[in-house]
Amino acid sequence: LKNQSSSTSGFILLGLSSNPHLQKPLFTIFLTMYLVTLVGNMLIILAIRSDSRLHTPMYFFLSNLSFMDICFTTVIVPKMLANLLSETKGISYVGCLVQMYFFMALANTDSYLLASMAIDRLVAICNPLHYDVAMRPHRCLLMLLGSCTISHLHALFRVLLMSRLSFCASHVIKHFFCDTQPVLKLSCSDTSSSQTVIMVETLAVISTPCLCILFSYLRIIVTVLRIPSAAGKWKAFSTCGSHLTVVILFYGSVIYVYFRPLSMYSVVKDRVATVMYTVVTPMLNPFIYSLRNKDMKRGLRKLRDRIHS
């Protein structure tokens, strides 16, 4: 880490708002959302673990998605909550890079897990007779390990690239955590090459699971449209509804934030979009997957009965 000025003084995270009257209300709102995220995703994990009928590839990926969502929000929200009650709102240079690393690693793991879940639905609907062979436990585990490995290598590469930048003037990050775009905005180095590398590398890493999901759903749609009965079509589509909702929420905000030039970066709009996939989507995931899923409802009822007994 060559940057001596940054490593000694660190950065200041401006947060969601600089209005002092909004700090405590924002703290209350985001603390509530964080607690709902922790409890909701933990219940999903416990329900899947406690019900043997949920020990299937789809719920294996869902339980890992819930675990990643807990870790993902924990990387960002506790520091944001502490800064809402603090006057200094500081974060060290190393702390900023560490937060950036884990944020990107966990966010991309989420992305690849969503792609793995799309593949699971593809096999279940388009090739159900070979489902048990195609989605064997060791293959699911390899998909999980591959998702984590690719995501952590991506995060390491990005952080090493960011650590080569110099920060000479303002150290105020106009965001609530250390994200790539607002940190790049502060650099007094020539960031044109870094922007190009980051854009190309991000496109490769994020577009791979995105294209996988798109291809899977195109195949699913073609297969479902061939089903003669309306009831059969609805039953097939209903197994994908929850996953598709989460995909739209997650990728919609991610694409809006990261697939634009730095010159088009907007502090307010990007903070709102970032809140969507860093806080809101992980909080909504347990509700999306449990409210429309009979198996999850049964698993949660079984978990409740075990707790009360």
Image: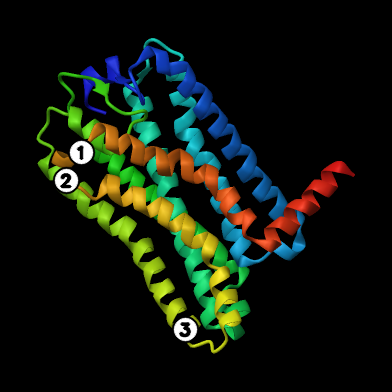
In the rendered view, would you say 118 is above or below 170?
below
Residue at image coords 36%, 30%? 177
Asked whether the beta carbons under mark 1 and mark 2 sit within 8 Å of each other, the answer is yes
Please rate how many residues cluster around mark 2, counting C-alpha atoms within 10 Å: few if below 14, some from 14 to 19, many from 20: few
Q: Residue furthest front?
A: 230
Residue at image coords 59%, 49%? 286
Left or right: residue 248 versus residue 6 is right
In front: label 1 or label 3: 3
Q: What residue did someone put label 2 on?
A: 261
Measure how far apart labels 3 and 2 are at the Cα level: 39 Å
Q: What residue did someone put label 3 on?
A: 225
Of pointers 3 and 2, the one earlier in the residue sequence: 3
Residue 266 position in % (x across, y down): 22, 36
Residue 279 position in % (x across, y down): 47, 38
Q: What residue did someone put label 1 on?
A: 265
Of pointers 1 and 3, the one earlier in the residue sequence: 3
Amino acid type assigned to the residue bearing label 3 in the image: Leu
Measure how far apart labels 1 and 3 are at the Cα level: 41 Å
Amino acid type assigned to the residue bearing label 1 in the image: Tyr
Check the image and tell me how it is coloured.
rainbow
